[in-house]
Image (cartoon, grey):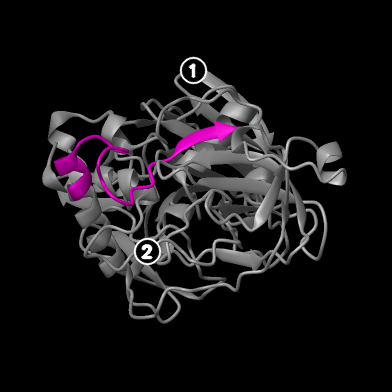
């Protein structure tokens, strides 16, 4: 394993490590800020709202930290945020919220101190939201996490004598505790050939904070486009087109297959692959597919070697294309048939995944696959299940920036086990 891949593995391992000596990352003091994910680092700007005193909620999941504290995923039952779900931090020595074994116990004011047995919670005070200072850049955060992980390795296994470490074990309310840490690339074996080693550049942030932005693209040597968003010059996407004629795209006006690899803002949240099959010039007949691969350990990367272009996928695996025609010639994807001839039916790209990870896929005709409801298919090595698209992209409004719900792989792992019976 090369040094770059090790760095990606350690970044995943350290997502719950707080307060290492000599670093600026400290446990968030305002732990009653409701957050989008179970990452309570001060440097992670994922505060959703502040829960006012008296807020009642049902506990859906817990994360047990080595410090004795917990992260609680709750569904709000009262107040202005009723119906929403969020993560809050339960500090055992100074809780500021009461736990109850049942809704009846909450009505009777019979609290419990046993977090794992609690099903309901009510806040008792308000704590203002705290944000990371603007000067604390993503690069600085990555360096501090790396320092912390070096301390973990030096002093023993996660949860050992590393002062301040918060290495979480996941416990979903309707899934038996696994007794193991969240998925990490340290246990992950990507399926790649020796000559197609991936280029692992880890995500630089967890959440994509951006809304809808303009996009501009420029063509690079190797006949692929690199694109950036808004005023940010940093690349957030690359794409290329198979325009035929070849076994995938036959001769014809306006016929093409586009592959687009998205990593806007360097965020783990929205690492995805879009395939657009255009059978003719009619927009309503474009066959759209959107794919996510898990675990998410790398930003997509493309390199050209002779007549091959090798793309590193978000889960660290690779797919190889013919550099001239853009046909798949190796790796974890295969193209199993030609482009659709068009028509009113849904005829998505005949692209299969044969890697070791989990694939999430949505297919739709003529519209953005992640909007408009419907079902998504999640598969892993012969097992699959279908889930509602709005479970994964809850904002289904017309002007949605279509951000994936699950920032962290551990949260998505819990969802998978609950809905599909298998995990990452």
Query: What is the number of the mark on residue 382?
Result: 1
Residue occupying image coordinates x 23% and y 48%: 149
Q: Nearer the viewer, mark 2 or mark 1?
A: 2
Numbered marks: total: 2
- Residue 60 drawn at (x, y percent): 67, 40
Q: Secondary structure at mark 2?
A: loop
* Spatial separation of the CA atoms under disc 2 and disc 1: 42 Å
336 sits to left or right of 54: left
Q: Is residue 101 magenta?
A: no
Q: Quadrant of residue 222?
A: bottom left
Residue occupying image coordinates x 38% and y 61%: 205
Query: What is the number of the mark on residue 26?
Result: 2
The stretch of residues the image draws in magenta is 151-172
User: Quadrant location of the C terminus?
Assistant: top left
Q: Quadrant of residue 364?
A: top right
Residue occupying image coordinates x 82% and y 62%: 79
Relative height, residue 198 to residue 210 (above, below):
above
- Residue 285 drawn at (x, y percent): 65, 49
- Residue 352 drawn at (x, y percent): 45, 29
């Amino acid at each position: 394993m090369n040094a770059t891949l090790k760095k990606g593995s350690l970044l995943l391992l350290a997502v719950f490590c707080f307060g290492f000596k000599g670093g600026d990352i400290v446990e968030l003091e305002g732990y009653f800020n409701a957050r989008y994910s179970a990452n309570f680092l001060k440097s992670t700007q994922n505060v959703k709202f502040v829960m006012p005193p008296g807020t009642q909620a049902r506990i859906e999941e817990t994360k047990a930290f080595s410090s004795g504290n917990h992260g609680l995923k709750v569904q709000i039952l009262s107040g202005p945020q009723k119906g929403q779900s969020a993560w809050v931090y339960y500090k055992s020595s100074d809780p500021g919220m009461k736990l109850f074994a049942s809704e009846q116990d909450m009505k009777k004011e019979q609290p419990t101190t046993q977090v794992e047995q609690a099903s309901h919670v009510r806040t008792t005070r308000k704590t203002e939201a705290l944000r990371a200072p603007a000067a604390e850049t993503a690069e600085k955060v990555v360096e501090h996490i790396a320092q912390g992980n070096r301390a973990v390795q030096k002093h023993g296994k996660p949860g050992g004598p590393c002062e301040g470490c918060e290495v979480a074990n996941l416990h979903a309310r309707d899934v038996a505790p696994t007794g193991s840490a969240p998925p990490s690339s340290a246990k992950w074996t990507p399926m790649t050939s020796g000559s197609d080693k991936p280029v692992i550049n880890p995500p630089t942030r967890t959440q994509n904070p951006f809304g809808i932005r303009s996009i501009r693209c420029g063509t690079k040597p190797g006949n692929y486009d690199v694109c950036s968003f808004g005023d940010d010059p940093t690349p957030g996407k690359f794409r290329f087109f198979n325009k035929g004629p070849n076994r995938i795209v036959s001769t014809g006006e306006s016929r093409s297959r586009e592959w687009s690899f998205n990593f806007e803002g360097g965020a783990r949240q929205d690492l995805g692959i879009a395939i657009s099959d255009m059978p003719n010039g009619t927009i309503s007949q474009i066959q759209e597919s959107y794919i996510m691969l898990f675990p998410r350990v790398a930003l997509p990367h493309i390199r050209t070697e002779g007549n091959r272009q090798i793309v590193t996928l978000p889960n660290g695996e690779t797919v190889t294309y013919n550099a001239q025609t853009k046909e798949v010639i190796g790796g974890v994807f295969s193209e199993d048939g030609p482009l659709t001839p068009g028509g009113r039916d849904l005829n998505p790209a005949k692209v299969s995944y044969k890697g070791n990870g989990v694939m999430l896929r949505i297919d739709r005709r003529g519209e953005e696959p992640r909007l408009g409801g419907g079902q998504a298919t999640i598969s892993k090595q012969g097992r699959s299940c279908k889930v509602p698209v709005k479970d994964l992209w809850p904002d289904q409004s017309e002007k949605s920036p279509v951000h994936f719900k699950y920032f962290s792989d551990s949260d998505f792992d819990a969802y998978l086990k609950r809905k599909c019976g298998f995990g990452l």
